[in-house]
Image (cartoon, rainbow, N blue to C red):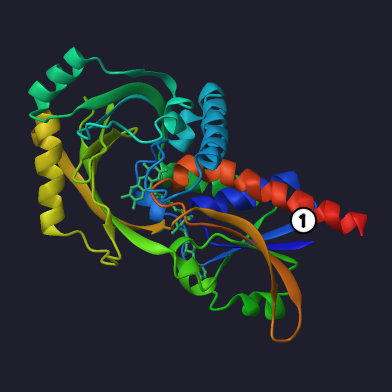
Amino acid sequence: MRVTVVGAGVIGMTSALAVKTNFPQFEVHVISDKFSPDTTADGSAGLWSPYLLGNTPCDKILQWGGITHRWLEKFWKAGLAPEIGLSLIPVYRVTSDPNGFPNVSIWTETVYGARKLSSSELEKLNAECTTSYKHGWMFLTYAVEPVRLLPWLTRQFLEAGGKLRNRKIHTLNELIDDDGCDLIINCTGLGARELAGDNTVKCIRGQVARVRAPWVMHAYLADDDDGNYIIPNTDRVVLGGTHQENDFDRTPRKEDCEFIYTGCHRILPSLKNAEVTKEWVGLRPGRHQVRIEAEVCKSPKGREVTVIHNYGHGGSGVTLCWGSAMNVVNIVENLMNLKSNL
Ligand SMILES: Cc1cc2nc3c(=O)[nH]c(=O)nc-3n(C[C@H](O)[C@H](O)[C@H](O)COP(=O)(O)OP(=O)(O)OC[C@H]3O[C@@H](n4cnc5c(N)ncnc54)[C@H](O)[C@@H]3O)c2cc1C
């Protein structure tokens, strides 16, 4: 059985590793026009935190996110943290919406020790940050730096016997007819607009900055539309951020820098002294909901191949990666059972 995974982002590499380790007898190839450090997750902080997921059903987010959280927990306990850039950090998540957070159980059920901030804690926070947040939570969760996780995933995949190929795919038929694969796993993120002809995939531009601020060891997320965030990684702190729809500009913009620095300095004034080491833009693959499903595709030459789509993870590709990959494995298992029952 020859499996081709298209895409080498966090979704492609976790899918490829999960399939190769669960079906070692399969020949698994990853074909991609970009690899780490040039994928969408590479500039992100990799915080476990569901965000910008459209109307993806809550039970799916809980399932995929929960599996990923437990996967990270296993690595943290096994001492793999330095290798994959994993840390367990306290997070403040606040909003100025008087109605609070929608579907709060999606994350509070998964993270550790989630508790509501009391009104006196909120008052103190608002006084310190000159903000007016109405609700807030505090909890512990993981951040895993994709710039370290992705090379690790790639090494695991290669050691398991997987193969990497650098190439752009223009149509799925190209793979079905010329490449001779038996199963395709489509993890092309924003590229699925063209490759799967899916116009519901939309670009959500995100600009962030990285600073040197080793004294910052907790994350701060303001859920408002014009909210900022501060997320520490192992040796840098990520300051965010923007979420501009249908904006494909990959160049950091001055006005976005101003928004990021003004907002984050207001929250933590000590950041004014932090050296900026990088400004970066990534294009999130947004969709009305994450798509993980199988579809049978027939080429003009009449060859039929199943394509398992795994894309549209918006602002949560890291948060949902391993759970999504295990969903792909379940679909492959079902296909294999179906085949053996024929
Ligand atoms: C600023 C920012 C901050 C973020 N912070 C977080 C966070 O803290 N936590 C979190 O969970 N998520 C975060 N995200 C979201 C996360 O980065 C994305 O959801 C995730 O990277 C999507 O992964 P992907 O593999 O689907 O897409 P991509 O990383 O875009 O990968 C797609 C892959 O497919 C390849 N490809 C596409 N089309 C073709 C083709 N036709 N032929 C060959 N190859 C093709 C590309 O080269 C690439 O390798 C953030 C995103 C941004 C921009």
41 w.r.t. 34: above or below: above
* Image quadrant in which the C terminus is located: bottom right
Residue at image point 45% right, 55% down: 36
Q: Is mark 1 within 8 Å of ligand 1?
A: no
Residue situated furthest bottom in the rendering: 301
Percent x, y of residue 261: 12, 43
Q: In the structure shown, which secondary structural element does the residue marked by tag 1 occupy?
A: loop
Crowd class of label 1 (few under 14; some 14 to 19; many from 20; radius 10 Å): some
Visible residue check, residue 5? yes
Residue beneath the point at 11% across and 27% down: 129
| Vertical side of 40 occupied by 119: above or below | above
Q: Position of residue 254 (x, y in %)?
A: 11, 57
Depth check: give the residue in front, 168 or 132. Answer: 132
Decide which of 243, 3 is in the foreground and name it. Answer: 243
Q: Residue at x 44, y 29 (%)?
A: 105
Q: Which of the 4 image quarters holds residue 4? A: bottom right
Please state if 283 lies on the left or on the right of 337 as rendered.
left
Q: Amino acid at mark 1?
A: Phe
Q: Quadrant of the N terminus?
A: bottom right
Q: Which residue is mark 1?
A: 26
In this rendering, the answer to whether 268 lies above or below 207 is above
- Does residue 87 appear anywhere in the picture? no
Residue 308 point in image, percent of width and height: 64, 60
Ligand 1 located in image quadrant: bottom left
> Residue visible at 56% across and 24% down?
78
